[in-house]
Amino acid sequence: MKLRHSPISPYSRKVRIVAAELGLAGRIDLVDHDTSRPGTGEAPENPLGKIPTLTLDDGEVLVDSPVLCDYLEEIADRRLTATSGPARRRALRLQAIADGICDAALLRRFETMRPEAQRSAAFDARQKYAMTTSLDWLEAHAGDHEAAFDVGAISVVSALGYVGFRFAHEPWADGRPKLAAWYETVLSRPSVRDTAPA
């Protein structure tokens, strides 16, 4: 399998952590991809030009990190995420909120790359609000991501790592002691440590 990714992308990191936790990392070839250069022909597999994209050995292509994570769980000898019921809904809810934090963070990052005269303070404030309220929600629901190291918890790890990397000047851990304490415990996992953005 071939994973087009970026070492900094939180969505790519999520897939890489899932692969490592399932013992599948050795079956995946990592191919760095720069999404800032659309139309270069580097990733014809994904018409959206986004990462991560997983190309299977038979040529089938999967796009979007939730799809990739689900596939990896499907082919592994075991699953990280419950297949049904409240535990699955909890994990998928966490994944959606964590991915939403990443979406907002990336939009803020892209806004800083626009010419200064074209930047919108109101747009940035809206995305920052989405990040802040979602991080507060994670703090208030700390028991959700402590329940199991599944796709939900892994998504939260990836989001927090990205926010800490790109927005170090806005420390997400301030005022969120339960979330910060949980994050510190999972940093020791090899799958988390080995995929940290740098």
Image (tube, helix red, strand yellow):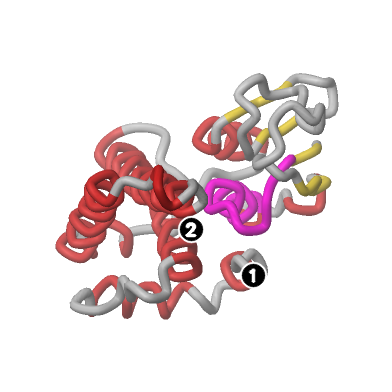
The residue lying toward the viewer, choosing from 39 and 76, is 39
Q: Say which amino acid is labelled 2.
A: Ser
Q: Residues within 10 Å of mark 1 (few under 14, many from 20)?
A: few
User: What percent of the width, then of the height, locates residue 119?
Assistant: 37, 47
Q: Amino acid at mark 1?
A: Ala
Residue at image position (50%, 69%) is 165
Is the residue 103 above or below the residue 84 in the image?
A: below
Where in the figure is residue 79, as x and y percent of width and height? 53, 44
Q: Residue 137: x and y, percent?
A: 18, 56
Tell which tag, 1 or 2, sits nearer the viewer: 1
Q: Say which residue appears at 71% left-offset and 38% top-offset.
A: 37
Provide the secondary structure element on which disc 2 rests. helix
Q: Is residue 141 above or below residue 194?
A: above
Q: Nearer the viewer, residue 130 or 146?
A: 130
- For the stretch drawn in magenta, the main secondary structure is helix
Residue at coordinates 48% horizontally, 65% vertically from top-left?
166
Which quarter of the figure is the N terminus placed in?
Answer: top right
Mark 2 Cα within 10 Å, few/some/many (few <14, many 20+)?
Answer: many
Q: Residue furthest front?
A: 117
Where is residue 97 drawn, in percent x and y?
Answer: 31, 46
Q: Left or right: 129 with respect to 55?
A: left
Residue 52 on the magenta segment: no
Give the residues in magenta: 4-19
Q: Is residue 54 left or right of residue 79?
A: right
The reply to whether the magenta stretch includes residue 15 is yes
Asked if marks 1 and 2 touch (Cβ < 8 Å), the reply is: no
Residue 94, can we see it? no
Choose between 105 and 15: the one closer to the eye. Answer: 105
Q: Looking at the rendered structure, which numbered label has been put on residue 158?
A: 2
Look at the image and tell me in which quarter the C terminus lies: bottom right
The label shown at residue 198 is: 1
Regarding mark 1 in the picture, which secondary structure is present there?
loop
